[in-house]
Amino acid sequence: MDTRDPPSVAVVDAETPGNVGTIARAMKNFGFEDLLLVDPPELDPDGEAYGFAGHARDDVLPDATELSFDDLVENYHTIGCTAVTNEDDEHHVRFPYSTPAELAERLPTVDAPTVLVFGRERVGLMNEELSRIDEICSIPASAEYPALNLGQAATITLYELRSLALADGDTQLPDKTRVRAPEPLLERLYDQWGDLLAELNHPEEKREKTMRMIRRVYGRADPTEGEVNTLLGLLRRATERPDLQGSDDRSDR
């Protein structure tokens, strides 16, 4: 993670307190702290905003700064978030644009206080406002219906930019995403597969190729120790052919 402060988050003229609370919660989820509000609705501590904010009601939301749009563009490198972009450089108001994922790669090189700017629930940011903003961000979505709820759009954007606010060790996830079973245990699994192929009278001339395929499948899957032990039990039971054992038992009666 870069040592610079993460971007601030600004909400312009939000209509419903609930969306402000939702954005504050998303900021708390992904490590962002500085919430800026332009012409906000009333944020009653007993109302929707604080109800939707989760743990962000303790810091992000009450610590929010109210300011004018003029102050925003004069003091920050601004990134306006919009669902609708222009298609080429004949119109510069909503073009060019970056996706949130692209911003995550580039923003660490921007040495300036930066703010992500979200607009109104129904119409987003006006063209007049976007014309004063430094760059545009847009979330890839279906061409048939690209418009997202304000809270959803902010949550997706902040998730994609979480590397600007959270180091790897700052999330609830363990350091390792996969724990592969020990190789000796996997070799036992392959041996059990070989025994099963023999029990099934799988053609000898095909067994080497089949075993190679099985090894490659498990090699790509990275099974855990628990998964391999379960598979070993199933294969062992299949190799012992309990159906035939049952037939033998019945024939003795």
Image (cartoon, helix red, strand yellow):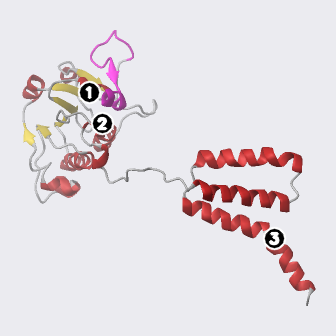
Residue that mark 1 sits on: 107
Q: Which mark is residue 161?
A: 2
Element under disc 2: loop
Residue 128 position, x and y percent, is 19, 20
Q: Earlier in the sequence, mark 1 or mark 3?
A: 1
Residue type at mark 1?
Leu
* Residue 227 found in image quarter: bottom right
Is 121 on the left or on the right of 5, as rendered?
A: right
Q: Residue at x 6, y 34 (%)?
A: 67
Q: Are marks 3 and 2 in contact (CB under 8 Å)?
A: no
Q: Is residue 111 magenta?
A: no
Horizontal relation, residue 44 to residue 210: left or right: left
Query: In x, y percent, where is residue 33?
Result: 16, 44
Query: Which secondary structure, mark 3?
Result: loop
The label shown at residue 241 is 3
Residue located farthest toward the bottom when viewing the structure as drawn: 253
Secondary element type, mark 1: helix
Residue 51 placement (x, y as % from top left): 20, 58
Q: Which residues are magenta?
A: 87-105
Q: Nearer the viewer, residue 206 or 172?
A: 206
Separation of disc 3 and disc 2 at Cα? 54 Å
Question: Residue at image x 44%, y 50%?
Answer: 177
